Image (spheres, rainbow, N blue to C red):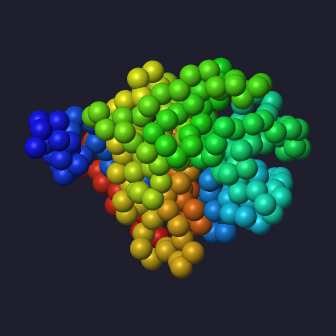
């Protein structure tokens, strides 16, 4: 076995904590109820509203709620043949990805009226922005930076963790100059350097939704939103009954864990 193969084998076998990537668990500091039927694909907070993109054929929607109390404000149903994915609010528009329709849907923010679509080269998974560019994922180890006006891809980065590609990057959020991404079918969020693509931190959210809250239709963790008012990070999952406000706790700090009074409901 070559040295390279030995290193790759060890990298696959060693737990994440063995590597230098910063490891976190979370503490729940607040929670808000949400509709269980929402198959959450995208989540964003802006101007006092919570924007939600929900998926599945025949069920995909763009939804807007009053963030303070969860009251519905507006909604748009998508065509039955469209499977919606992530969304982001950028300027006066809302951009919503589709999974396999090779299109990004653009809505007017003020009233959620559909404006037009922009082409995608392949699948759409998660989307965010860095104030000047849209950033989206397609399920691979790539993140693409594109023009919000033309959908022209300006550049891309390969996401790696200690030299290994990280795939299945799903819902995205721009947080303090970094990209946070759900890793599909896992209870993990990674924090990515947007210049290099390197994963700088990994967040373990196992046990966030208490076992008693699971139903037959409950699906995976998905959804990250930063509240611009106070910088709080809110997360949820597909058909989860709660949005959770989380705080990061380094794994070498045992004073705080995911177990909190809020989490025992």
Which image quarter: residue 56? bottom right
Q: In the drawing, does residue 65 fall left or right of residue 129?
A: right
The one of 218 and 148 positioned closer to us in this rendering = 148
The one of 21 and 227 positioned closer to us in this rendering = 21
Which image quarter: residue 106? top right
Q: In the drawing, does residue 232 fall left or right of residue 205?
A: right
Report whether residue 8 is seen.
yes
Identified at 73% across, 64% down, the residue is: 57
Identified at 78% across, 42% down, the residue is: 105
Q: Position of residue 42 (x, y in %)?
A: 63, 49
Identified at 81% across, 56% down, the residue is: 78
Q: Residue furthest bottom?
A: 216
In the depicted structure, whether residue 216 falls above or below residue 185? below
In the depicted structure, whether residue 72 falls above or below residue 197? below
The one of 221 and 96 positioned closer to us in this rendering = 96
Q: Position of residue 95 (x, y in %)?
A: 73, 39
Report whether residue 70 is seen.
no
Q: In the drawing, does residue 74 fall left or right of residue 175?
A: right
Q: Position of residue 11 (x, y in %)?
A: 20, 44
Q: Position of residue 7 (x, y in %)?
A: 16, 39
In the depicted structure, whether residue 122 falls above or below residue 28? above
Identified at 37% across, 63% down, the residue is: 207
Quarter containing the N terminus: top left
């Amino acid at each position: 076995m070559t040295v390279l193969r030995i290193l790759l084998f060890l990298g696959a076998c060693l737990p994440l904590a063995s590597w230098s990537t910063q490891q976190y668990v979370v503490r729940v500091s607040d929670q808000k109820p949400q509709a269980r039927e929402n198959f959450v694909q995208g989540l964003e907070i802006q101007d006092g509203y919570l924007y939600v993109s929900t998926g599945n054929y025949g069920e995909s929607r763009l939804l807007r709620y009053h963030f303070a109390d969860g009251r519905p404000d507006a909604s748009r149903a998508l065509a039955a043949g469209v499977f919606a994915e992530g969304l982001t609010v950028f300027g006066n528009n809302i951009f919503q990805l589709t999974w396999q329709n090779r299109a990004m849907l653009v809505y007017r923010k003020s009233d959620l009226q559909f404006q037009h679509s922009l082409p995608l080269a392949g699948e759409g998974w998660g989307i965010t922005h860095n104030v000047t560019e849209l950033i989206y994922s397609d399920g691979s180890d790539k993140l693409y930076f594109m023009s919000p006006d033309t959908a022209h891809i300006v550049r891309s980065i390969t996401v790696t963790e200690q030299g290994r590609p990280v795939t299945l990057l799903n819902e995205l959020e721009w947080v303090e100059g970094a990209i946070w991404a759900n890793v599909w079918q896992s209870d993990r969020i990674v924090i990515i350097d947007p210049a290099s693509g390197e994963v700088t931190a990994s967040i373990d959210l196992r046990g966030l939704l208490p076992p008693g809250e699971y139903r037959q239709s409950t699906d995976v963790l998905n959804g990250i939103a930063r509240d611009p008012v106070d910088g709080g990070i809110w997360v949820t999952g597909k058909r989860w009954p709660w949005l959770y406000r989380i705080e990061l706790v380094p794994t070498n700090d045992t004073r705080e864990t995911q177990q909190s009074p809020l989490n025992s409901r």
